[in-house]
């Protein structure tokens, strides 16, 4: 058995199963071993039905009268049955799990684990998981639960892993360890649990190995980056000072420090690989402008990549105003750009010094004469390949200096691991005169009394409002109000105000026009989808309303909210909820704090790193074990990785390790 063999070589895995597995990322034997149970159910103490109480329960019994029906609401099927033991019977209900009808044999006993609760007027066991009593290892009473994938349910994974029971012994050590065999022992323990303690210990060890891979990848990236060559960019203090003198404001201390770090990086022959982290509104664009200015002074070209056309257009306007007086030619390249051929010619022959654009910048026919600095705004919105495409446009043999900017602060633990190879500058200071944004969670039914008066107040003072909706179109099924409908409703309530809507499916020219008029103060209330989420900067807007707030993630709301609070007037954010339930922890944290760094830590705790960065980076960082908040362990691993790297033989010896970390290496490297 080779760990990198195709899963199809495993016992019990046919081509059909292999196909499903492959769809969920399980392609090799190794992936299969590392498809760890999501949780365990304990069957130690099933409760007799006569004694059942509301809450989480385990019941041991037989099931009868099972049937499925369609609910009135489309897309919902309800499967019901009756579970009985010697002491009584209860109803069970599953939603959208019609396969349950065929799952059970009427004469066999099962464990049912789920919540016993009041639903539609009667107590039932809601969506329990079920396991055949004879399948459960009675010694530990622990049953591993795997995430279901397509037709493969948890019990199928259990069966397949069961087929491999004697194969675990063949798993070699991944890395040098004081306890040889610990890896196979740990993997065995998580799939075949003998006690909660043994599972815990095994998971701790696997977390250690996982962190080891991450940190090793980051350290190797750093080494590899150091081998690349970039064009050194001379820092001209006097000229930069002159430029600073032309600004209407003074840089914040944090901006000065970041700019200084960047200038120093760019003077080197090794490419800069720097992440500029700054909370929303901290003035990252200004720092980027300084870097771009400095590079163009040396005759170098600069590319700035933005995730949306709206944002690219805005950067273009800002940077043009700032830089053109200094004889720097600035151009915008997006999908909607008209004379692309001519523009690309001028980029290629070097007439354009700074080009700002979207994905349109990445096409093969966009060539540069001397691209030496690449700036990526909201870097987490781009995949690795996209970032690398741009990096490859530098002259032969050279890599560009790279400045990545993000407003989603990376928690310290992730910085130590995943992003360990990046140099980081932090803007932890907002420009002077900013006022905090007051955030309020508001049930929709209170809109009239509490929100409308606020809107009136704001528009009378000629300040502006953003109103964010979930949907573009109306949809009879959904409970969300579309941008169009919301704009129409607001028009009835505020007939004198100029109200318009904006969404991603509109034509680019139309979007640009609306944004331009909004930023020119010609629109009072802008009803929009989340297209305004990133980067948009209209300092005169001071009220942000987010409808269906519960449906957004913490970081996303923080970003959206960051569209206000950019000027000197007091700003407000209303998070509208249906009011049916208590507001989530997420919303309450947002109400309490507007510190992006604090919120990022909270988010990491609430959701785990894979969710935050995994989703944003196209699933690339799928950590199996959320252990990244364990800074003590991280430090221990760092020491061990250093020791590992000191012996060059290790890299040759532990080939599986080296092979496995390439995906992590790609994840963070910028060059
Ligand atoms: P972000 O970090 O969210 O990208 P921006 O770069 O869009 O922030 O800057 C937010 C606003 O703050 C812009 O209007 C910008 O002109 C302004 N700004 C940037 N730096 C300063 C400063 N040092 N003093 C005052 N205003 C500043
Ligand atoms: Mg920005």
Image: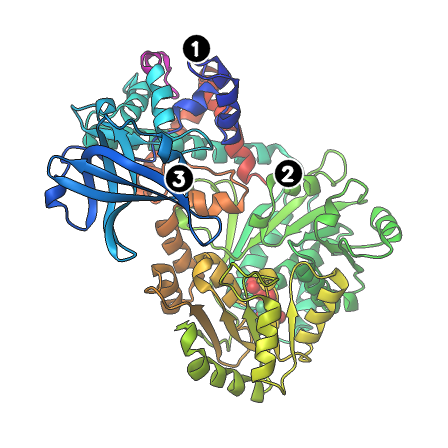
Whole-number angstrom distance, CA of label 3 to CA of label 1: 36 Å
Q: Is residue 454 visible?
A: yes
Which is more toward the observer, 608 or 569?
A: 608
For disc 1, the neighbor class at 10 Å (few under 14, some 14 to 19, many from 20) is: few
Disc 3 is placed on an element classified as loop
Q: Of discs 1 and 2, which sits in the foreground?
A: 1
Q: Is residue 513 above or below residue 390?
A: below
Q: Residue at x 74, y 66 (%)?
A: 510
445 on left or right of 40: right
Q: Position of residue 157 (x, y in %)?
A: 38, 25
- Report helix, strand or loop for mark 1: loop
At label 2, counting other C-alpha atoms closer than 10 Å, the crowd grade (few under 14, some 14-19, many 20 or more) is: few
Q: Which dot, 3 or 1, sits closer to the camera? A: 3
The secondary element bearing badge 2 is classed as: helix
Identify the image quadrant of the C terminus: top right
According to the picture, the residue beneath numbered tag 2 turns out to be 385
Q: Which of 457 and 66 lies nearest the eye of the viewer?
A: 66
Q: Which residue is mark 1?
A: 1
Of circles 3 and 2, which is in front? Answer: 3
Q: CA distance from mark 1 to mark 2?
A: 33 Å
Q: Position of residue 446 (x, y in %)?
A: 41, 78
């Amino acid at each position: 058995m080779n760990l990198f063999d195709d899963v199809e070589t495993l016992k019990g895995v046919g081509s059909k199963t292999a196909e499903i597995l492959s769809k969920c990322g399980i392609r090799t034997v190794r992936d299969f071993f590392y498809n760890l149970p999501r949780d365990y159910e304990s069957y130690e103490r099933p409760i007799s039905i006569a004694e059942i109480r509301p809450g989480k329960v385990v019941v041991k019994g037989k099931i009868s009268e099972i049937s499925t029906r369609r609910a009135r609401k489309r897309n919902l099927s309800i499967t019901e049955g009756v579970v009985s033991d010697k002491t009584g019977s209860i109803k069970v209900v599953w939603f959208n799990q019609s396969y349950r009808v065929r799952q059970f044999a009427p004469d066999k006993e099962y464990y049912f684990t789920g919540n016993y609760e009041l639903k539609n007027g009667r107590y039932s066991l809601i969506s329990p998981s079920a396991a055949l009593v004879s399948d459960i290892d009675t010694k530990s009473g622990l049953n591993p639960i795997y995430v279901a994938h397509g037709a493969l349910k948890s019990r199928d994974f259990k069966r397949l892993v069961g087929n491999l029971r004697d194969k675990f012994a063949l798993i070699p050590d991944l890395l040098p360890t004081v306890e040889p065999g610990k890896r196979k022992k740990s993997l065995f323990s998580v799939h075949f649990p003998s006690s909660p303690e043994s599972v815990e210990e095994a998971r701790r060890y696997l977390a250690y190995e996982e962190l080891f891979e991450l940190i090793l990848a980051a350290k190797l990236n750093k080494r590899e980056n150091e081998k690349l060559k970039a064009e050194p960019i001379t820092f001209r203090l006097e000229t930069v000072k002159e430029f600073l003198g032309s600004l209407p404001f003074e840089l914040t201390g944090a901006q000065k420090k970041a700019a200084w770090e960047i200038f120093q990086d760019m003077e080197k022959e090794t490419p800069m690989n720097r992440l500029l982290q700054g909370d929303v509104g901290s003035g990252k664009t200004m720092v980027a402008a300084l870097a771009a200015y400095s590079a163009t002074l040396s005759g170098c070209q600069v590319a700035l990549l933005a995730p949306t056309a709206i944002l690219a257009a805005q950067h273009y306007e800002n940077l043009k105003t700032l830089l053109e007086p200094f004889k720097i030619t600035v151009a915008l390249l997006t999908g909607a750009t008209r004379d692309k051929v001519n523009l690309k010619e001028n980029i290629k022959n070097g007439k354009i010094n700074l080009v700002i654009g979207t994905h349109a910048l990445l096409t093969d026919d966009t060539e540069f004469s001397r691209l030496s600095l690449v700036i990526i705004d909201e870097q987490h919105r781009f995949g690795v390949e996209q970032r690398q495409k741009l990096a490859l446009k530098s002259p032969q043999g050279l890599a560009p200096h790279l400045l990545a900017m993000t407003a989603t602060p990376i928690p310290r633990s992730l910085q130590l691991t995943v992003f360990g190879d990046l140099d980081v500058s932090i803007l932890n200071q907002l420009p002077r005169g900013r006022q905090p944004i007051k955030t309020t969670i508001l049930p929709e039914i209170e809109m009239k009394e509490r929100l409308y008066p606020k809107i009136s107040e704001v528009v009378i003072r000629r300040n502006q409002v953003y109103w964010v909706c979930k949907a573009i179109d109306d949809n009879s099924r959904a409970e969300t109000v579309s941008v169009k409908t919301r704009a129409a409703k607001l028009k009835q309530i505020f007939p004198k105000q100029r109200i318009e809507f904006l969404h991603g499916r509109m034509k680019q020219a139309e979007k640009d026009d609306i944004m331009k008029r909004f930023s020119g103060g010609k629109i009072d209330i802008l009803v929009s989808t989340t297209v305004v989420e990133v980067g948009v900067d209209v300092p005169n807007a001071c009220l942000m309303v987010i409808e269906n707030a519960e449906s957004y993630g913490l970081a996303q709301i923080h970003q959206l909210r960051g569209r206000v609070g950019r000027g000197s007037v007091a700003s407000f954010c209303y998070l509208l909820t249906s009011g049916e339930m208590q507001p989530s922890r997420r919303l309450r944290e947002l109400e309490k704090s507007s510190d992006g760094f604090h919120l990022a830590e909270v988010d990491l705790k609430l959701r785990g790193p894979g969710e935050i960065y995994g989703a944003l980076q196209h699933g690339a960082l799928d950590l199996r074990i959320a252990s990244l908040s364990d800074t003590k362990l991280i430090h221990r691993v760092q020491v061990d990785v250093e020791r590992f790297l000191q012996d060059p033989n290790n890299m040759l010896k532990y080939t599986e390790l080296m092979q496995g970390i390439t995906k992590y290496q790609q994840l963070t490297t910028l060059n």
